[in-house]
Image: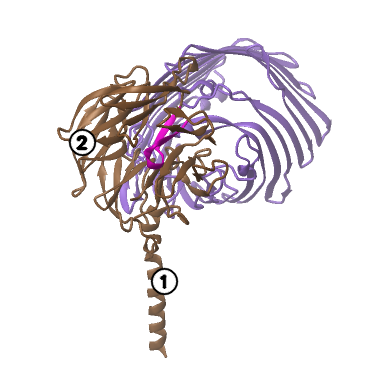
Amino acid sequence: MDPSSIKQNGSKILLKASSLQNYDAGVVYRHMAEKWRFKLGVQSRYHLNKYSYTYNRKKLDRQTTDFLKNDVMTSISYQLAPHTVIIGDLWWQNSDRIIPESITSGGIIQTQKDINTRTRIGAKHYGNKHIWETSFAYANEKLHFMTPGVDSKANTDIFIINTGWTEIHKESHYFGLQHRSETASPNFYTETKYRNTTQLSGAKNFNWEPDFMTHISFRQDLTDGKLMPLSWTLLNKYRKLTVIFSSNYNLPGLNDLYWPVGGNPYLKTEKALKGEIQFSPQFKQWRGRIAVYANMVRDWIQWVPHSNGNWAATNQKKVLSRGVELQAHYHYPINTTAIDFHIEYAFNRTTALEHYYDPSLIGKQLIYIPRHKASLSTDYSRHHWRFHLAYDFTDIRFDAADESSFLKAYHLVSAYVAREIGATTIRLDVNNLLNQDYSIVRFFPNPGIHAELSAIIRFY
Amino acid sequence: MNKYLLILLAAFSLFFHSCTEDSNTDKTSLNSGTLIVNEGQFGTGTGTISYFDGKTLIEDIYADNNVGLVLGNIAQSVIKFDNKFFIAVNNAAKVVVVNAADFKHLGEIEVKLPRYFAVANNKLYLTSWSEDFTSGFVNLIDTKDLKIVKSVPVQGLVEKMVAQSNQLYITVSASAFDQYKNDVVVFDTDKNEVTGSIKVGDNSNDITTDSNGDIWVICSGFYDFSNPANNTAGSLHRIRGNSSDFSIELPNGSSKLVSGQNKASLYYLSDGAVRKFNIADLATDPLFKIEGFFYSLGYDETSDLIYVGDAKDFQQKGTVSTYKANNTQSAVNTLTTGIAPSFFYFIK
């Protein structure tokens, strides 16, 4: 056994408990031998999310989530020949939860159960100047959503065969071919639905000069015999300046098309064209990033409340999302002490340029997208201690398409303190220190001040 | 000097306090006018009640007169009885009761999925649905103690009611597999029990009466979301005695039915327009048409105005327009209301 790999072998235990009565426990075991790599993770969580809120002048308890979730994840690889590795992984998840209704509702219970399995086997061959990777994956998704009026069960099988070739040169390039076959047979479709997609993709880097490079990539999908729009990215980077143009599309999912109430079989494919300029300056201990972007989306797929009060999938004819993002980070180390500051600000305007049926909504900010977001945080580390303090600001968000009503802006302050004791890390988080009464979605209140205690215990 | 300053400050604070407590209803009598029930955003919102006195609109009369109180999710319908307004709030599982004079909150009655009210035999009745959306109830309300005194189960999703001779005639929202799939349920208010049903078209939607004392029912037909080929036709039926003696076929999805002036005509929504049916001719007026995909319909006898509600995209505030029966091309008023205006109540 390679002595350097000994430290890599062992296990890690994660424990977490929150004042919201949320509990997590997990273990990760990792073993690396000469030709073998093995990893196994098991995690279980039970989240009640128990807290109170004020409604109609009364303090009430929020409907709990009773969220039980178990995850098992394992991955294994074996070096078959000096340049060939075979890999396999498996992920299994089982969850069961109550989905709380809005506080203006009468307490109807909605539950959702999910069982997801994903497995993959494959091989990687390393040549002198290339990597060739082939894999076969199978996924099964079982969903059971239940309300007093709805009992929806869905079973979806997905098969993916993938092969990719990467040339590793000064100017590397990649070509890949993938076939994906999806079979969905929920109890609410009149018949089993199929979707077959064959995908050809490629990428190439051109290193013109040491500080000037170009990256191009493309993806062409053939779905159920129909050629989809070409997706592509063109990136140019010169020193600290990056300019990106990209085009992408989003084919409506099977639920968008066929969900029993609200699915829309006439949905059009969403297409987006994006341009972004990034500048990443650095000065002494300061690092920054300024990004300006514009994203034009045709036929944005959105679920909105629709006829007879049901939610329905619809296309927003033409939407422009544009904005500015500013980030700055300051790092100041002194021996065993370090101070960090992070500042972030984002401005976003996402508005309809064209509307299928209501021209009065042109120019209005789309619902639940804030125009301004900002955050400040600082970290202080000394010996085995670490302190963190963060402030987040989210501006008002309209919840009516005509901007006639909005949710108030909110300010969140959170902090944690962590201590390393040998191979163990203990951390105490306190969130929403100002005890803000806020909602991300109207009438779905978020918890006030709450704490979380966690520990990571390593056995290496 | 300080004493005068204190008196001045006290006067100011009293003035502003009285302004805060002041409400729109102090300036408005609620003995007439129109209440517009706005459902609110489905799932995540609260219903609101708008009030229109013929000239001005109070957009949210409940919030204006009950600061800090929220009506609840999906306001459904309203009725005035015993000097109180009773507001059915469907998804919030309650009936909110307010004083008819000033719209001040008086109390609440817990009831799962309340729908529509009717007064019969000088008693207030309410339809409601079971939590599994498979059956319903006809509930008798004690309007003094604000409680349900009797709940009579019905094997169907009971909806709108009209009263005649101590009987309630009740529409039933149905699919092709339900027991009362093309029926109007008859309920005896003396015995408080279901006494029978009358066959009409598929999926009865709304009900009203005419000047002859006959009952009219509009049926929407069945709608199959996954296969529109299974849709069935809508229809309009006259109930005379205890059976439907006249009917005409209407497009699938026809809905809402109100009596017009002197109850000599009917208005209903069908095929993207408000239509008019003349009772004397037993025919739809081919010249009458208010075009639009409306969400609600009402007729105010006092002002002789037809009310239509446009829910738009159910995310933004809706609009209500009023039309004269003899001029369907231009609206008399267009009002911006709450989200999804779905029900009109004309106060008498």
Q: What residue type is labelled 2?
A: Asn
Chain designation of label 2: B
Magenta part of the protein: which range? B254-269
Element on which disc 1 rests: helix
Query: Mark 2 to mark 1: distance in Å?
Result: 51 Å
Res. B132 in view: no
Q: Nearer the viewer, mark 2 or mark 1?
A: 2
- Relative to A112, A363 lies left or right: right
| x, y percent for residue A84 | 64, 11
Q: Is residue A296 above or below residue A135?
A: below
Residue A249 location in percent, x, y? 66, 26
State the image coordinates of residue B90 (x, y, percent, origin top left). 34, 38
Q: Which residue is drawn at 46% across and 16% down?
A: A189
Look at the picture and state if A438 lies above or below A45.
below
Residue at 37%, 25% in the rendered image = B237
Please state which of residues B17 and A407 is positioned toward the viewer in this rendering.
Answer: B17
Report the amino acid beneath label 1.
Phe
Q: What color is chain A drawn in?
A: purple
Is there any visible trace of residue A152 in the rendered image?
yes
Q: Mark 2 points at which residue?
A: B166
The 10 Å Cα crowd at callout 2, few under 14, some 14 to 19, many 20 or more, is some
Q: Local crowd at mark 1 within 10 Å, few (<14), some, or many (≥20)?
A: few
Number of numbered discs visible in the structure rendering: 2
Question: Along the line of sight, which residue is nearer the eye, A61 or A85?
Answer: A61
The chain coloured brown is B
In the rendered image, which residue does mark 1 sit on? B16
Residue extending furthest toward the bottom: B1
> Is B208 placed above or below B16 here?
above
